[in-house]
Amino acid sequence: MSVVLKDVVLPLADFALEVSVEMGARTTALYGRSGAGKTSLLEVIAGLRRPIHGEVAIHGRVVNDVPPRRRRVGYVPQDDALFPHLSVRQNITYGGALDRAVIDVLELAHLLDRGVKQLSGGERKRVALARALLSHPAVLLLDEPLSGVDAELRARVLEYLVRVRDEFPIPMIYVTHDAEEAAAICEEMVVLERGRVVERRALRG
Amino acid sequence: MSNEWQIVGLTLRTAALATILIVPPALAVAWLLARRRWRGKSLVETLVALPLVMPPVATGLILLELLGRRGPVGGWLHRVLGLDIVFTWRAVVAAMMVMSFPLLVRAARVAFEEVNPRFEQIARTLGATNARVFATITLPLAARGIISGMLLAFARAIGEFGATILVAGNIPGRTTTLSLAIYNLVQLGRDAEAFRLVAFTVAIAFAAVWIAELTTRRT
Amino acid sequence: MRLLLLIALTTRLAATEVRVFAAASLTDALQEIAAGYEQQTGDRVLFNFAASSTLARQIELGAPADVFLSADEAKMDALQKRGLIDVRTRARVLSNTLIIVGDGIRSSRDLVGRKLALAEPSTVPAGIYAKTWLVKTGLWAKVAPNVIPTDNVRAALAAVESGNVDAAIVYRTDTKRPAFVIRDGPLISYPFAVLTNAEQPLAARRFLAYARSEAALRVFRKHGFLIAERRRDDVVPR
């Protein structure tokens, strides 16, 4: 089981996140409307927010008291959060050395020495992905990877995501509010509504 | 007069040293104020701001008590290291440090607060220790604001008078800074020479603040 | 006649304020003298105590003052040259002695190698007297690198009392502590005068006369001041 949450409670603005769920598939979609608490859930798994109750386990290890830097999660936030003062190369190698495989799959070789301000939206997504991958994570957390990408590029970025899923055997938790997107990539779907898991089902993916 | 250059030199050296010395503690305090909350935080904020609002001579008197040969700090230094602070250039630096500290803390705090915490969080998930996050993410992104703050602190140090005259006295060649020298010359009725030193002071302060403004503006 | 009486009465009733600029070393004695004066005349005395050089500068710049009590002739001369004092009232009244305050000072040679506080030796009378003596005894060159100049003589005393300097040269009248008395120092002279721009010239003269009276001289003596002998050249203005 990649990620297990037991009786996790995190108070949010209007309601509380109350979740007990096991996510063990290769790719799990975390699906729900905006404001359902999906991002907060990712942050709990990553260690960026502490639940007031409950247990978080990654690959069988309880990580409640483990700081983010030792949880080995690769977190790709919704806004990419690429370090603006570092080049592409410096960004992606921040957590680990360059790996040709990752560069090739995401086709970043020609972008390595660019500044991040010169990148297009789609390129930014790829760089953020590469950065997370190169830190050798035990689980990948992707927060709405296709948000902010225009329609024409969506297909292309989706392609890259599929490639990453196929080339690298790292379990992914994929947050989205788009059911089609979820179906294109993920094997399982967990539906979150107002902080609670209301449904689980298998997908094709 | 070569004397004038000596005074300018002393002023620049002591102000530069004072500015450099306050950087580590000021950044530490600014970071804590920007990123952490704790009981008694507002007490710390107020204490740090005190030298900004208190009359400089009052601050100077407190420093005199602390750093004099019979004071808690000065006494220890005198007994253990044979070092005197009061009435030496060290007191000039000390007075400048105390008066400039709140300015740098203020500027650095704003600079740290303007760094998106997101970046620091991501850096942590990528395996960076707190120290590495600070050195590679927080500090570089806050650098512009911090440098601007340092320039303001430097300008303030150049202009320091009230605390300095109490704690360092007015010893020609050793503690006579630009402001003290101007005061002396006015006392002696040598206004023309006093105005020459005023011109130096204005030029230096102008340059420091100008560069500070330029540094902040280039966003 | 009744008018004159009325004027005399009203000037008495409306308490006159006399502004006295006086050398710092005269602080304690003058405050005592002023108390007696205020009781006797109903006037109020407002003091400005500072180094005579500072006071002279302030007077030159137009600070409101009625009487100037200086610690050396040079400051009074400077004001006289600019016509700022009423020469008819100028008189040398007091003298003083220099002492060296500091632990373990048994002779003038003990000053060498020690931090010495002096009132600014280029302008303040106490400092000028001290430097004159140090030059005369050949000590100035050796002592100068360790001199801490202060704004006035009381500040020099405070510096040595705080322990931040090892010694200070001040007036005998500044402290009752045992100290090394300088017997071969320069002649110290305190001239007093009423200022030409005095707002209250009558009250100023009254105060000056009181400050030279036996009652006041007794107080000065009590505080350790020497009374200047009346010399013939005191009367002739320069």
Image (tube, helix red, strand yellow):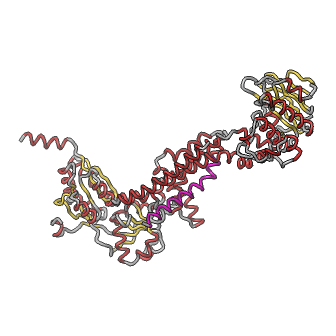
Which residue sits at x=17%, y=50%?
C202
Instruction: Using residue B63 as the reference point, say whether residue A193 is left or right of it.
Output: right
Q: Where is residue C75 in the image (x, y as percent from the top left)?
A: 28, 63
The quarter of the displayed image where residue C97 is located? bottom left
Q: Where is residue B12 in the image (x, y as percent from the top left)?
A: 52, 59
The C terminus of chain A: image quadrant: top right
Q: Position of residue B37 (x, y in %)?
A: 66, 39
Instruction: Using residue A105 as the reference point, say whether residue C170 is left or right of it.
Output: left
Residue B19 sits inside the magenta stretch: yes
Q: Can residue C160 be seen in this view?
A: no
The quarter of the displayed image where residue B3 is located? bottom left
- The front one of A5 and C5 is A5
Residue B34 sits inside the magenta stretch: no
Which residue sits at x=83%, y=41%?
A130
The N terminus of chain A: image quadrant: top right
Q: Where is residue B91 in the image (x, y as percent from the top left)?
A: 52, 59
Please, what is the dominant secondary structure of the magenta stretch?
helix
Q: Give the range drawn in magenta.
A: B2-29
Looking at the image, the residue that sits furthest to the left is C1
- The front one of C68 and A18 is A18
Instruction: Using residue A196 as the reference point, say whether residue B169 is left or right of it.
Output: left
The quarter of the displayed image where residue A14 is located? top right
Q: Can residue A19 be seen in this view?
A: yes
Above or below, comparing residue C217 to residue B137 in the picture: below
Instruction: Using residue A147 as the reference point, say whether residue B166 is left or right of it.
Output: left
